[in-house]
Image: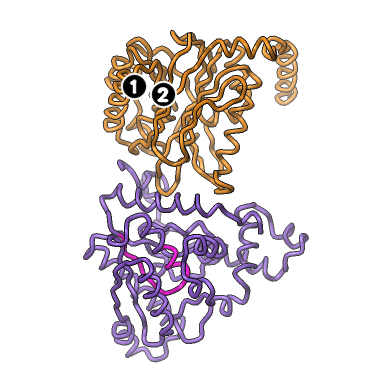
């Protein structure tokens, strides 16, 4: 896995600089992010706090009725270590009000609704606190599409979106994230007993190794299989990348004029900054 | 005569030429007060890197007030500045300008515009069509921009055309954080040292810092002597100004000790390259 090994000190320095500059350019000094108690949001919180200072970061803890109580305890543990403010918003009333007349809704629909409920709360606090929303999605889940569109994927700036899960783990160790958070099984915690690896059917380490070869090293499936990678795994991951491409793009706009957004009207977001 | 040089490793504002110009004028004036002979800014230092559709808006004509202001400022202290130039036929080029004695002495247009991976420069800009050395009051110079030096022919032409100091300005994005530095920095370090040694010249490298839409520019500006030694090196990531002295007599010593340029068989090189080109284009 040597190609996946990064210099964590340099990564930390680059990502804290990224948060400081990309917020500062837009006149923001504060950040808000969802704290799930998992490793991704904890690492994002550590980066934001090192960049902006504890007094400038707010962690939102947004449990649902069925959320594992340990998740909230871990979120509070991380916030306590960092000395950042936390706000707890229970999303059960909103989610249940919506599904009251829809008793047949699948657990996936409920999970997506929870993720999007949390997104609207984060963006409300963005305005209330004059704070930019910091993202918590890692490269593995973005590439696999293992996320909720406009839900947990939504943010203004994402410091960890180019780090695979194993790299987030290494950075977490480097930055002193509590071992309990690093060691536990990753879970979206949308329903009881859910774990990422259980749901995906493969381990993050296998996914990371495969994604790294396919994406970063531009290898093709055949050459990986020839090298001894599991054929089913490689083909499945390739399909997941292809089938989730829509999640990594802005909505498709039907072209009519001579100049349409992002096709022939091309400007950087940091225009004038 | 030895001369002093300042590497201005800055982070320009994307698309705000006036704000960047003000900063340049301030830093040139400061360099003059500090007795510097030359100050070097990074590629596209007047406009930032990812200008995209802003290219036409930030482009400057040769007779623009902005270039005029830089020329006026660069009197006692010469300056290398990066900008987008609009040519009389309305082509837009990535330009490096050498200002000296109140005028614009030399302009190099970036010859190689990367259009692969994360880059799409050819979409917005026209390629430069020449590499020329030029005489400055300080030394015979060559000017190149970023991707130009990934093609060793550019440095070779500049050196054979007489350049003793090769100034390379860049906007190099950081990729691959490994073992205390970036893979990109390692690649540049190898090239800069190799050119200094192979062509017996000083290599001045100035790269920007800062972030644009999440892309980080790593800095690490430096001067490499003809012996391949880094005389001055700016830090990674941070804005910095680093000063050093260039002694043209070191070029003489290097070229006499190791006369690689003198020994170069230009006839053979040109003949073989001509043959290769002809064979490729033969129907």
- Is B52 located above or below residue B269 in the figure? below
Q: Are marks 1 and 2 in contact (CB under 8 Å)?
A: yes
Chain shown in orange: B
Q: Residues within 10 Å of mark 2 (few under 14, many from 20)?
A: many
Instruction: Answer left or right for A238 relative to A72.
Output: right
Q: Is residue B121 above or below residue A191?
A: above
The magenta segment: A31-44
Residue in the foreground of this view, choosing between B174 and A112: B174
User: According to the image, label 1 marks what residue?
Assistant: B31
Side of A157 relative to B69 (left or right): right
Q: Please give the name of the residue rendered at 30% of the width and 77% of the height, measured from the top-left corner.
A: A88
Q: Residue at x 57, y 64 (%)?
A: A166
Which of the two labelled residues, at mark 1 and mark 2, occupies the earlier sequence position? 2
Task: Report the residue at 44% width, 30% height from top.
Answer: B43
Q: Nearer the viewer, residue A102 or B147?
A: B147
Q: Chain of mark 2?
A: B
Q: Which residue is mark 2?
A: B6
Per the image, label 2 sits on a secondary structure element best described as: strand
């Amino acid at each position: 896995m040597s190609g996946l090994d990064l210099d964590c000190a340099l990564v930390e320095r680059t990502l804290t600089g990224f948060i400081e500059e990309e917020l500062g350019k837009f006149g923001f000094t504060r950040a808000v992010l969802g704290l799930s108690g998992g490793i991704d949001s904890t690492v994002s919180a550590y980066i934001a706090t090192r960049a902006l200072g504890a007094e400038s970061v707010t962690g939102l803890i947004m449990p649902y009725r069925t959320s594992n109580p340990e998740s909230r305890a871990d979120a509070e543990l991380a916030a306590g270590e960092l000395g950042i403010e936390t706000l707890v918003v229970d999303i059960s009333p909103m989610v249940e009000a919506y599904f009251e007349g829809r008793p047949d809704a699948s657990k996936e629909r409920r999970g997506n609704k929870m993720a999007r409920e949390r997104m609207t709360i984060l963006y409300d606090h963005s305005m209330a606190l004059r704070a930019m929303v910091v993202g918590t999605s890692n490269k593995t889940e973005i590439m696999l599409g293992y996320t909720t569109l406009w839900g947990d994927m939504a943010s203004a700036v994402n410091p960890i979106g180019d780090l695979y899960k194993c790299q987030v783990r290494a950075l977490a160790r480097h930055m002193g994230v509590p071992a309990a958070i690093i060691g536990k099984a990753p879970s979206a915690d949308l329903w009881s007993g859910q774990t990422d690896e259980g749901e995906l059917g493969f381990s993050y380490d296998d996914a990371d190794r495969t994604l790294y070869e396919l994406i970063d090293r531009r290898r093709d499936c055949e050459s990986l299989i020839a090298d001894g990678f599991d054929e089913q795994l490689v083909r499945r991951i390739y399909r997941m990348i292809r089938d989730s491409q829509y999640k990594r793009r802005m909505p498709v706009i039907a072209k009519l004029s001579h100049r349409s957004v992002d096709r022939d009207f091309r400007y950087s977001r940091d225009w004038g900054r | 005569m030895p001369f002093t040089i300042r590497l201005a490793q800055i982070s320009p504002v994307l698309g705000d030429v006036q704000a960047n110009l003000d900063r340049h004028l301030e830093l040139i004036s400061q360099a003059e007060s500090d007795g510097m002979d030359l100050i070097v800014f990074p590629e596209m230092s007047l406009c930032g890197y990812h200008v995209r559709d802003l290219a036409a808006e930030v482009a400057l004509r040769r007779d623009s007030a902005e270039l005029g202001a830089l020329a006026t400022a660069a009197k006692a202290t010469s300056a290398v500045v990066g900008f987008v130039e609009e040519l009389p036929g309305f082509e837009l080029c990535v330009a490096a300008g050498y200002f000296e004695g109140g005028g614009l002495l030399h302009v190099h247009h970036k010859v190689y515009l990367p259009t692969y991976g994360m880059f799409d420069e050819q979409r917005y800009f026209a390629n430069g069509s020449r590499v020329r050395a030029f005489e400055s009051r300080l030394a015979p110079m060559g000017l190149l921009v970023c991707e130009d030096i990934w093609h060793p022919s550019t440095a070779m032409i500049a050196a054979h055309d007489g350049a003793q100091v090769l100034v390379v300005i860049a906007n190099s994005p950081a990729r691959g954080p490994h073992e205390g530095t970036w893979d990109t920095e390692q690649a540049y370090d190898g090239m800069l040292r190799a050119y200094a040694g192979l062509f017996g010249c000083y290599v001045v490298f100035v790269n920007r810092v800062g972030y644009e839409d999440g892309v980080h520019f790593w800095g690490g500006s430096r001067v490499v002597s003809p012996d391949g030694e880094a005389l001055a090196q700016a830090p990674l990531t941070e804005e910095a100004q680093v000063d050093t002295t260039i002694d043209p007599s070191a070029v003489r010593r290097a070229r006499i000790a190791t006369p690689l340029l003198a020994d170069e068989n230009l006839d053979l090189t040109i003949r073989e390259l001509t043959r290769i080109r002809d064979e490729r284009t033969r129907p």
